[in-house]
Image (cartoon, grey):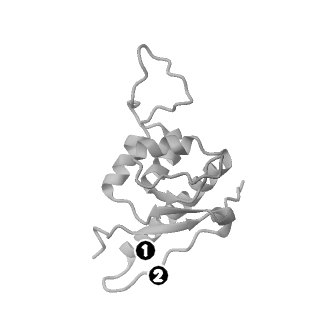
Amino acid sequence: MSTAMRHPEPQRLPLTNGDWLLVKKYLTAGEVRAQLTFMRRVNPLVPWRGDGPAPVLLPEPDPTNYGLARAAVYLLDWNLTDADKQPLVIAGRDPWELMDVLDNLDAGAWTQVVEAITAHDAAMTAAKDAEKKAPDGELPSSATSPSADILAGAMTT
């Protein structure tokens, strides 16, 4: 029988220059649904073209918010700093506030965060898929780790 519920478990993901992210190892069903809600967030950089004040949420998920929403549900903490080299505190922030912080990251830092979380999500999905395919009582082998290039933030074409 496969695992239906898991204990909350943090996992540290390395970035370049000694930076790191602390993320949730797995998401719950509620967090996956929340990600879809966060994808409905109005992009603050795109002017509202409707009548009246800008809506809080779009009627449908915006695919351009996918990486932002996924980062908001996975991220627990990190050691990134602001422009004055002061810790950029995100621990304990709600996902809506966290998305504002993420929107203000340097583009290079943003790319590293998204790539690390994307690789982590893929590895955890592969691990869950392997668990489903394993015969009862047999431990599945661990998922393949993401390549060092992805964790280091290298871009591929």
Q: Quadrant of residue 46?
A: top right
User: 10 Å neighbourhood of mark 2: few (<14), some, or many (≥20)?
Assistant: few
Q: Which element type, helix, strand or loop, lies under badge 1? A: helix
| C-alpha distance separating marks 2 and 1 | 7 Å
Q: Kindly check if marks 2 and 1 are in contact, taking CB atoms under 8 A apart as contact.
A: yes
Vertical placement of 61 versus 151: above or below? above
**Marking on residue 106:** none
Q: Which residue is mark 1?
A: 130
Label total for image = 2
Vertical placement of 51 versus 156: above or below? above
Q: Earlier in the sequence, mark 2 or mark 1?
A: 1
**Quick check: 148 left or right of 40?**
right
Percent across and percent down for residue 18 are 65, 66
**Quick check: 84 left or right of 94?**
right
User: 10 Å neighbourhood of mark 1: few (<14), some, or many (≥20)?
Assistant: some
Q: Nearer the viewer, residue 117 or 9?
A: 9
Q: Which element type, helix, strand or loop, lies under badge 2? A: loop
Q: Identity of the amino acid at label 1?
A: Ala
Q: Quadrant of the N terminus?
A: bottom left
Q: Identity of the amino acid at label 2?
A: Ser
Q: Which residue is mark 2?
A: 141
Percent across and percent down for residue 87 are 57, 54
